[in-house]
Structures are given as structure tokens and as C-alpha cells.
């Protein structure tokens, strides 16, 4: 039998997951855990590049994120969940990879470039606030991927330049030190981006237009009732265009049974927005229910969560140690048997 390919993906523990994460990324990870050898990294070291002055936030969110991922259906018997900082080999690899990347190349990385300009808006044009650690995070991400031997990396479009950078590092490493590392490839998701409740192209925490998986029923209802609809519809029986309505957009995700009816009634002016939103809220709450139930189970069994992270990190570490041993040989720093 052919060996399963290894997937490595990562996520920063900086807040709770929302529907954008679920539909854009995590839902795919839940599917791919069936057919791949899947590793999911909780990237606490990477989160600290932006949040080094707020360790409490990162610490708390490692737990929250783990609960959210398990709630979404990541099955610890199928996928391996691990914490980045528990794998010191990743930090070690980062040091050696740092020699293979120029500062100019890092500054040219489109993802980094966008983040730098956002930071400059906050910190002023002089670039204060851009740390060495931040500029180098693509190098550390290349180490994440290659340490585990990930050949497939499921990411959103904004992460593509980081995967390209990792590929370059691997090629350079292999060309200098001999064929040692595997070049990773990206896997793009079908819904790279979920629109926000306000119609914004992206659902995001900082945009204030997200439904979080931990939102209680009342909050979900309130958010749905405030969602953007076809602005040209004034009266309950005006015909409207569902294609510009966020309520219909989310109906498409969670109300699969009567979609045609919803669409038709909306177009014919036979469906008031309030009724339509109430139905969506009900379906959304129903959709979130099994997710909440799984979360509750793990919240009530914290020692299970500890075990999942501990064992997952142990398993990931064995792979990283193997990679590190090959890397040391290649760089000729394998002075003694470990
Ligand atoms: N940079 C990714 C993000 O911000 C998180 C991440 C860390 C990652 N390490 C990774 C993604 C390795 C893919 C592979 O979402």
C-alpha cells in the first residue's frame, strides 16, 4: 500500500475561530484527516512574533484554539495536533535556514510586505515595531513545514508567498548541502474567503463582522438580525436580489434543504427579511450545535485536551528529530552520536 502523504498546516493562536476559519480552512482539514497523515500546528512561536509583549493572550488562545479545532471535528485519533514551541528542532532549523535567505528577499515577500505596511500605519513610517523575529517568520514557517516533512500545505491565498519562500529555502539547502529536504506544495481551499455579515469580502475578528463558533444562541441571533440585506428592498413585499444579500449567502451554507424556495420567494417579494433572518438564525444555531457539543465535551475533560496536545507534540517531535539529524549530517555538524 502506498504510504499516506503528509499534510502540515498551522494556525496562530490569537483568538477564537469563526465561520470564516471553518469554511475557509478547518473544514477542509477535517476532511483531509481521513486520507492523509495530517499534522496541525498551533503556531504559538509565530503568534509571539506579533504578541511577544502579551504572553497571557497567546497562552490562553492555545487552549481556546485547541478546543475550537476539536469542536470542528479534528479527530485526535486521525490528525496530530501539536504546539510549535514543544518542538525545539523547529527553532534550531530556523537558525540554519536563516543563512539561506536575504533580508531583501524577506522584505519583498508580498505577505510580509503587506504586514509591514500595516504595521507602519500603526507604528509610524520609521518602521519601529518591525522586529528581527517578525521579519524572519517566513523562515521559521519553512522550518515548521520541513521539520515535520510536510509535502502538502493547505493554506489560504494570502499564505502562498510563504510557501514559495519555503520552497526556495529547500532548493537552496539541497543545492548547497546535498539532497536532504522535500519541497512542499500548497493545497488551496475551495472557499478561500468567507464574506462577513456586513458584506465585506472577508470575515474577520478585527472587522467585527464574524460569527464565532463559541457565540451563544442569543449572540448568533442578534448578529444574523443585523446582517446586510439587499439595500434596495424597503418594504416587506418588495422583490429583492438574493445575490447581494448576506442572509441568503449564509442560507446557502447552512440551509441546504429549502434554498430554492428562499431564493424564489425573495425574488418575487414573497419573503420578508425579518422572517428570512429568523429562519437563518435558527438554522445557524442548529448548524453550530454539534460543534458546541463537542467543545463542551472537551471543556469538561481538560485532562484529555492536555493528553492530545502532549502526545501530538511528542509524535511531531520524533519526526522533527529525524529531520534534524539529516540536516546536521548534511551541514557536517553531526560531531557525535546523540
Ligand atoms: N502563517 C500561518 C497563519 O498566519 C500560520 C502557520 C504557521 C502556518 N506555520 C505554518 C501555515 C505552516 C501553514 C504551514 O495563518
Image: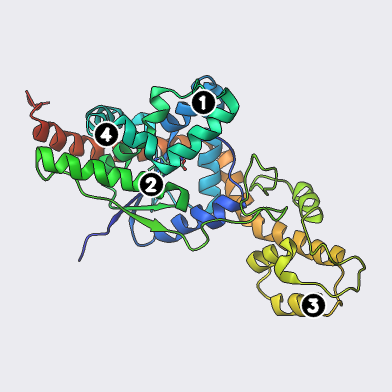
Mark 1 to mark 4 CA distance (whole Å): 24 Å
Say whether residue 139 is left or right of residue 289.
left
Nearest to viewer (mark 2 / mark 3): 2
- Secondary structure of the residue carrying numbered label 2: helix
Q: Quadrant of the C terminus?
A: top left
Q: Quadrant of the N terminus?
A: bottom left
Q: Which residue is mark 1?
A: 51
Say whether residue 271 is left or right of residue 68.
right
Say whether residue 101 is left or right of residue 126.
left
Q: Point out the tag, 2 or 1, that comes first from the N-terminus.
A: 1
| Residue at the (6%, 23%) spot, across then down | 335
How dense is the environment of label 1, judged by Cα within 10 Å: few (below 14), some, or many (20 and up)? some
Nearest to viewer (mark 3 / mark 1): 3
Q: Position of residue 158 (x, y in %)?
A: 47, 48
Q: Which residue is mark 3?
A: 267
- Up the image or down, 297 lies above or below 24; here it is above
Check contact, mark 2 vs mark 3: CB within 8 A. no
Q: Position of residue 224 (x, y in %)?
A: 77, 55
| Residue at the (44%, 61%) spot, across then down | 31
Q: Nearer the viewer, residue 94 or 127?
A: 127
Nearest to viewer (mark 4 / mark 3): 4
Q: Which residue is mark 4?
A: 101
- Secondary structure of the residue carrying numbered label 1: helix
Q: Which residue is mark 2?
A: 161
Mark 2 to mark 3 CA distance (whole Å): 42 Å
Q: Nearer the viewer, residue 235 or 121?
A: 121
Amino acid at each position: 500500500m502506498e504510504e499516506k502523504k503528509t499534510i502540515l498546516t498551522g494556525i496562530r493562536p490569537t483568538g477564537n475561530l469563526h465561520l470564516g476559519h471553518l469554511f475557509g480552512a478547518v473544514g477542509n482539514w477535517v476532511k483531509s484527516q481521513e486520507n492523509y497523515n495530517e499534522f496541525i500546528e498551533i503556531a504559538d512561536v509565530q503568534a509571539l512574533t506579533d504578541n511577544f509583549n502579551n504572553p497571557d493572550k497567546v497562552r490562553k488562545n492555545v487552549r481556546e484554539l485547541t478546543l475550537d479545532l476539536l469542536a470542528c471535528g479534528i479527530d485526535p485519533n486521525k490528525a496530530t495536533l501539536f504546539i510549535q514551541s514543544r518542538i525545539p528542532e523547529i527553532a534550531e532549523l530556523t537558525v540554519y535556514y536563516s543563512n539561506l535567505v536575504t533580508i531583501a528577499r524577506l522584505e519583498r515577500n508580498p505577505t510580509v510586505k503587506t504586514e509591514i505596511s500595516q504595521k507602519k500605519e500603526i507604528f509610524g513610517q520609521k518602521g519601529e515595531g518591525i522586529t528581527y523575529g517578525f521579519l524572519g517568520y517566513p523562515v521559521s514557517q519553512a522550518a515548521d513545514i520541513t521539520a515535520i516533512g510536510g509535502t502538502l500545505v493547505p493554506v489560504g491565498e494570502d499564505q502562498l508567498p510563504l510557501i514559495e519562500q519555503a520552497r526556495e529555502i529547500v532548493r537552496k539547502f539541497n543545492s548547497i548541502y546535498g539532497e536532504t529536504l522535500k519541497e512542499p506544495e500548497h493545497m488551496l481551499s475551495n472557499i478561500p474567503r468567507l464574506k462577513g455579515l456586513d458584506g465585506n469580502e472577508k470575515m474577520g475578528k478585527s472587522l467585527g463582522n464574524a460569527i464565532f463558533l463559541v457565540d451563544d444562541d442569543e449572540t448568533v441571533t442578534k448578529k444574523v438580525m443585523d446582517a446586510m440585506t439587499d439595500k434596495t428592498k424597503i418594504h416587506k413585499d418588495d422583490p429583492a436580489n438574493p445575490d447581494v444579500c448576506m442572509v441568503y449567502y449564509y442560507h446557502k451554507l447552512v440551509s441546504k434543504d429549502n434554498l430554492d424556495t428562499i431564493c424564489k420567494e425573495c425574488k418575487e417579494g414573497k419573503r420578508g427579511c425579518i422572517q428570512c433572518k429568523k429562519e437563518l438564525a435558527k438554522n445557524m444555531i442548529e448548524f453550530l450545535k454539534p460543534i458546541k457539543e463537542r467543545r463542551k465535551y472537551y471543556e469538561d475533560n481538560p485532562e484529555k485536551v492536555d493528553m492530545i496536545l502532549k502526545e501530538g507534540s511528542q509524535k511531531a517531535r520524533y519526526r522533527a528529530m529525524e529531520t534534524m539529524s539529516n540536516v546536521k549530517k548534511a551541514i557536517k555538524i553531526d560531531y557525535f552520536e546523540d
